[in-house]
Image (cartoon, rainbow, N blue to C red):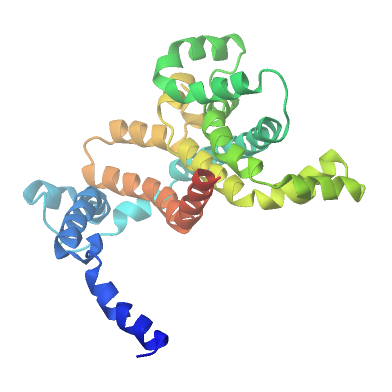
Amino acid sequence: MTATSLLVTQRPSRAGRRAARPPLPWANPAVYVVAAIAVALMLAPIAYIIIGGFRTNAQITTDPAGFPQPWVTSNYLDVLSGDVFWRLVGNSALVALATTVGVVALGLMAAYVLARYRFAGRGVLYAFFAAGLMFPLTVAITPLYIVVRSLGLMNSLGGVILPQIAFALPTTIIILVPFLRAIPDEIQEAAFIDGCSRLGFFWRMVLPLSLPGVITTGILAFIGSWNGYLLPLFILNDASVFTLPLGVQSFASQYSVDTAKVLAFTSLSMIPALIFFSLFERRIVGGLTGAVKG
């Protein structure tokens, strides 16, 4: 028997190695059953609200859990044809876009300094931003209200945008620092040798290489601002500057008797955030994965 045949005889076959491996967790049908139940529990309230908008108040009173018989579109058409819904959407879009731009711009510059420069107190400064994750908005809402009122920003969208930027910066910096720190120093040295300035290196090299993290933080800031409710509730008292979450609460109080129209208004207010999150879900996961690896 030759040495080659001996090695082939002693080496276990590929099929044997595959058979010896433990079964993967997702190969168990129970995993799919549990996942399906969890998804159903999460989607059931959303489906009830959307379908409820196609019903009349009489149908909801007679059979609260039934399907529309017949399907009615007048509730959605009434909401879409009015100017209240579109004004709320415009206010929320303005606040969300301004917050996203501010968070990404300030967070990227701060994270670049913390990741690429060595200076006294860098660790303390990074820990200071990390500590911001431990203080939710509900804890600081009272002093924040006093500060906003002192600045004369009450009943203005700026009074919502600036605090949202401040509270979103810790998460942005924590995500972006690993991306910027993972850029090899050799690239920076080669850029400086070629005559690239520090600002040019930031725009030409740092920004493209950290684009997954920038997109992730921008999406998180946009969604967080779009769904923000507590801060607008304290800052905004004028209905003309209400954001969409605050407008839904106001609309539900004003039309509390018309349950079907309230459900239609609520479902329409959810659709933009659901579409936005569905389109960029992979970007969020990929950016967070890169931050963990970095």
Q: Position of residue 203 (x, y in %)?
A: 78, 46
**Visible residue check, residue 136:** no
As drawn, which residue projects farthest toward the left?
62
Residue drawn at 56 percent across, 15 percent down: 148
Quadrant for the N terminus, please: bottom left
Q: Is residue 197 left or right of residue 51?
A: right
Viewer-nearest residue: 124 or 92: 124
**Visible residue check, residue 248:** yes
Q: Is residue 34 left or right of residue 126?
A: left
Residue drawn at 36 percent across, 31 percent down: 250
Q: Position of residue 146 (x, y in %)?
A: 52, 9
As drawn, which residue projects farthest toward the bottom?
1
Viewer-nearest residue: 34 or 78: 34
Quadrant for the C terminus, please: top right
Residue drawn at 82 percent across, 45 percent down: 189
Q: Is residue 179 left or right of residue 73?
A: right
Q: Position of residue 71 (x, y in %)?
A: 22, 62
As drawn, which residue projects farthest toward the right?
195
Q: Position of residue 211 (x, y in %)?
A: 64, 51
Residue 176: image quadrant is: top right
